[in-house]
Amino acid sequence: MNTDPVVTHPPLQLIALDVNGEQHEVITEPRRTLVDVLRHDLRLTGTHVGCEHGICGACTVLVDERPVRACLMFAAQAEGARIRTVESLSDGDGGLNDLQRAFTEHHALQCGFCTPGFLILADGFLAERPDASKEEIREVVASNLCRCTGYQTIVEAIDACATARRGACATPCDMSAGKEH
Ligand code: FES
Ligand code: FES
């Protein structure tokens, strides 16, 4: 008599995802998280995985321009939404955009593990609040964890980027025009 345990596989599901303006179809188990599908199926490894419990924010992505912990969201839940990852931040030629350059210039990273989460968090925040004060920036970045920088340089970088964008937009205009993606 065969006493081997019976192995059952969960059903697979076809899901359609809009990531960084591109349409993707993925066949996966319904229980897979958004961050796993982004990293392993779509090879968008810029989004990092830290705690996998919604604490650290390393996995932050924008879903319909709102920051989301991608380790806490099933990929299937993101169907029909616009997902943006750190890979969307570029000057259009594959170079760094102004926010990324500000991080570099202000030494806002050391090991860099947390950086994609902070970048995409800040990008979404500045799109919504281009006139944010330094105190408001400080409050927002407190939602993500960094073991290295002490946060001050991250706040300085985001504030410098916001200030530069406002300067580039001195006359009444659409603040989102300062974004380079
Ligand atoms: S890996 Fe998602 S919050 Fe830490
Ligand atoms: S730069 Fe190392 S965790 Fe933030």
Image (tube, helix red, strand yellow):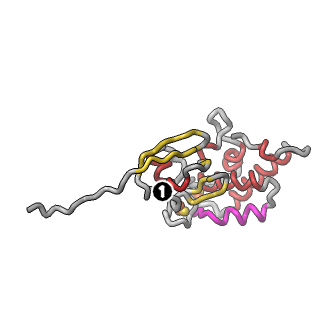
Q: Nearer the viewer, residue 24 or 127?
A: 24
**Circle count:** 1
Q: The magenta stretch spans which residues?
A: 134-147
- Horizontal side of 170 relative to 164 (left or right) equals right
In percent of width and height, residue 117 lies at: 60, 55
Say which amino acid is labelled 1: Thr
Residue at left offset 54%, top offset 47%:
46
In percent of width and height, residue 120 lies at: 64, 52
Residue 138 lies in the magenta stretch: yes
The answer to whether residue 37 is above or below residue 148 is above
In percent of width and height, residue 178 lies at: 78, 43
Residue 123 lies in the magenta stretch: no
Residue at left offset 69%, top offset 53%:
124
Q: Quadrant of residue 171?
A: top right
Question: Does dot 1 land on a helix, a strand or a loop?
Answer: loop
Residue at left offset 61%, top offset 63%:
144
Question: Which residue is label 1 attached to?
Answer: 33
Q: Nearer the viewer, residue 49 or 77?
A: 77
Q: Nearer the viewer, residue 105 or 98?
A: 98
Residue at left offset 82%, top offset 55%:
131
- Horizontal side of 13 relative to 46 (left or right) equals left
